[in-house]
Amino acid sequence: MPSSPRIGGQGAWVHRRNVRGYEVFLEPDPDEGGYVVRCPSLSGCYSQGDTVEEAIGNIEEAILLCLEDTQQLKES
C-alpha cells in the first residue's frame, strides 16, 4: 500500500481511495483491530473489515446499498 498521510496523534494514518467513483477513507481501528472505512459524501455510509481488502470490499457493498436506498427514495 502506498504511504498515507498521518492525521491526528499517536502516529494514526488515513488512507484515501476511490471506490465506485466515491472517495473513501480507510484507517486502522485501534480498539477493535482491523480497519474502519467511511464514505463522507454518502451520509451514514461506513463499514469495517479485518483486512484492507475486506474493508474496501465491504465499503463497496455499503456504497451500493446507500445508492439503492437513495434511488428508492427518489422513486417514492
Image (cartoon, rainbow, N blue to C red):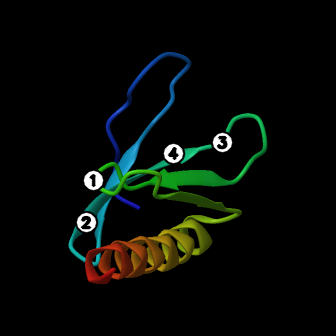
Numbered circle sitting on residue 51: none
Numbered circle sitting on residue 27: 4
The first of marks 3 and 2 along the sequence is 2
Q: Nearer the viewer, mark 2 or mark 1?
A: 1
Position above or below: 6 against 72: above
Residue at 35 percent of width and 76 percent of height = 67
**Label 3, residues with CA under 10 Å away: few <14, some 14-19, many ≥20:** some
The first of marks 3 and 1 along the sequence is 3
**Label 1, residues with CA under 10 Å away: few <14, some 14-19, many ≥20:** few
Q: How many marks?
A: 4
Could you say where residue 64 lies in the image, as x and y percent from the top left? 41, 80
In the image, taking residue 68 as reference, residue 55 lies left or right, namely right
Position above or below: 47 against 4: below
The Cα atoms of the two marked residues, 1 and 4, are separated by: 17 Å
Name the residue nearer the viewer: 41 or 15: 41
Residues at marks 3 and 1 touching, judged by CB atoms closer than 8 Å: no
The Cα atoms of the two marked residues, 3 and 2, are separated by: 21 Å
Q: Which residue is mark 3?
A: 29
Name the amino acid, label 1. Ser
The first of marks 4 and 2 along the sequence is 2
Q: Which residue is mark 2?
A: 22
Name the amino acid, label 2. Tyr
Residues at marks 2 and 1 touching, judged by CB atoms closer than 8 Å: yes
Q: Which residue is mark 1?
A: 41
The Cα atoms of the two marked residues, 2 and 1, are separated by: 7 Å
